[in-house]
Amino acid sequence: MAEQIVNKLSKDNFNADDYVLEIASGGDVYQDLQEHKQRVLNLNDDTAVALKKNVYRNYTQFIETAKEISYLEGEMYQLSHILTEQKTIMTQLLDMSMGGKEDTGRDKNAPQAPEEHKRTIASLLDRVEGCSRIAEVPGRYIIYDADLIELDTDSFQEIQRVHAYLLNDSLVITTFIRNRRGPVRYKYQALFELDSLAVVNVRDVGPVKNAFKVLRFPDQHMYSTETAKSKRAWLDKLEEAKRIQVAANSQRRELAEQMSIDIPEGKNQEEAFVEDESLFFQSVSMETSMLQVDWILELPEDLDMSIAQRNFEESVDLILKANEYLEQVPVGPSLKEMRARVDHRVKQLTDTLTRELQVSPDRSLRGGPQVTRRAVVQLIRLGKATQACDLFLKNRSAAIKQSLRQLRIEGATSLYVTKLCHVFFNHIIETGKEFRFTFSQNQGCYSAFVVWAKAELRTFVNLFSRQALAKQTALVTVAECVCIARTSCALLSTIGLDLLFALNGLTLKGIREVLLYNKEQFIEASRHRNVEERWYPLNLKNPNAANNLVRDMQQLGFDRFNQLVYDSCFVSLANSTVAFTKVVLAFVKDALKLYVPELYPNIVEVLVEVFDNHIQLVEGAVTSDRFEEERQFILKNVDYLFKTLLPLIEKKLTEVAGRKVKELQDIQKRSQVISSRVRTLGVLI
């Protein structure tokens, strides 16, 4: 059936409408459509798998072809070199005398023995930072090293200068460490295994001079040397290293065949080992045989393929399966080599997952924290929970910053603060939920989340303070904005996080500055009102105005103010006293919205200074000769301030602070001083 579908779909004159009509003309249309849909999906999966295999097969053939081309190029170079040497020898022979004989000694250009090229891997550890894992593979040694220039494969522009080390089984790329003193001059960047790469010579075209490519599926790198001689040396050394590795692999396989042990029937492997004469040789044989399993041999290539296809889940599954299997293999040189190859792929996969979580200008952050789950989960499975936690939180910081940057300052300050709090705290809550889901098995990371949340809160407060805690901002606006922020911050309790104490601490300085600024404004306004005061009952001129005033006072918490109104529109207080009452009660109402224990001294200080300043102004008026006739009315206002307004303010503070306000009680003593001075004036009169 599948072949029939393939034949129909692959025809040149295939018509989709006719094909669907043919399917729909049957008896059970729904069932037929479901079956055909499933067949087409299966065919799609098979085609995708076949395409991947073909791509890998073609790429492998391309690498083999490139190797052959490189080998032929090397042969041609050797042939040219031999012809040049022959020509030189013939020239020397013609120049020699007929009777003389030159003692040339050993040819300096003759190839040296391999042992003369070997250098201990310890020199790599002494000069390269971060390459300790490379030295763990036994039998590795340095064949050649030199400086190279890495070029962009598309634009041919210089990327960076590197220092490359050619080992007998791999190529190590290192970068220069600037301003570093001491023997360590380079930093490890990458390792390319020789059996999985091909070296291709690059012709000198345009800006490209003395360059060659290193092909390793699915990437390619281009390097150039300073001279053509250096380039030829690199190509020769790379070819030599490949031959050494092929020979070493052949010897290893021959040794495995020679050391293979036949286990008698009816006995398990452990009994056979006990009966053998040499446990060492048996261990080596077991190690070699266990590492000759097909899926282990193909593991590096399979990992390269899955990483290139971004199939991270399959890559991690292969790595975990390989690690579990390799734990059962006896320790030996082959095991260390295989572990080094697996660890190299683990580093590649880790770097790829890290790039998935890094923030870049061309990557959108609007998908929420869930979009990072795939990469984070795989990093955790690889045992890199700390790194995953750090990258995840940095990603969310960038998302929060981007969202806050998009907010526009428009309309009232409280409207902007509402949007700001909604965006910020929703991000924190979403991040906390995703963090709890992803890192549920890594309890040690929760402290990092708390530290991160507090740092983000500090950034939020800086932005919040610039808008809501400016000195010139009205206290009522400040109180409203701070209440919005505290209410939004309290929502963090849904994820088990309480940062309200941190928010209060961060906003404390700004609130204090606002209180002090408002104190100066209150004192200055009170002085202006008292200068213009004529000390007669306030006339509101109509009952509506009086009702509005009573209603305003009730909203400020003064429920008995209506008792001071008479004749529908008169108030038995002076205009300055009524205005002072409204200002002080409004301040108390807004200040108590902002109240935290740390602000108690500042609130009391403002009230004491404002009240004391007003009392001084009233005292000056009651003792002035200008208001001799109005003295009784002024005393009535003084009596109201000390016996009605001051106890009301003290009561409101006591209800919130939970303690008596001793500073306000001390002001009550001023009433006795004023009464004494008035009585003295009365005697003099």
Image (tube, rainbow, N blue to C red):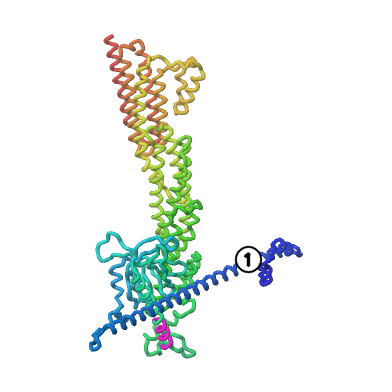
Q: Is residue 251 magenta?
A: yes
Q: Which residue is mark 1?
A: 41
Q: Amino acid at mark 1?
A: Leu
Q: Is residue 141 visible?
A: yes
Q: Is residue 490 visible?
A: no
- Residue 250 is situated, as x and y percent measured from the top left of the image, at 42, 83
- Residue 122 is situated, as x and y percent measured from the top left of the image, at 29, 73
| Front-lying residue, 583 or 288 | 288
Image vertical order of residue 384 relative to residue 410, above or below? below
The quadrant in which residue 628 appears is: top left
Q: Is residue 44 magenta?
A: no
- Residue farthest to the top, as pictured: 685
What residue range appears in magenta?
248-258
| Front-lying residue, 9 or 421 | 9
- Residue 97 is situated, as x and y percent measured from the top left of the image, at 24, 86
Image vertical order of residue 52 relative to residue 648, above or below? below
Image vertical order of residue 238 relative to residue 312, above or below? below
| Front-lying residue, 147 or 232 | 232
| SS at mark 1 in the image | helix
Q: Residue at x 47, y 79 (%)?
A: 293
- Residue 38 is situated, as x and y percent measured from the top left of the image, at 65, 66
* The N terminus, quarter of image: bottom right
The quadrant in which residue 214 appears is: bottom left
* The C terminus, quarter of image: top left
| Front-lying residue, 12 or 676 | 12
How many numbered marks have been drawn onto this rendered protein structure? 1
Q: Residue at x 41, y 73 (%)?
A: 193
Q: Label 1: few (<14), some or many (≥20) within 10 Å?
A: few
For the stretch drawn in magenta, what is the main secondary structure?
helix
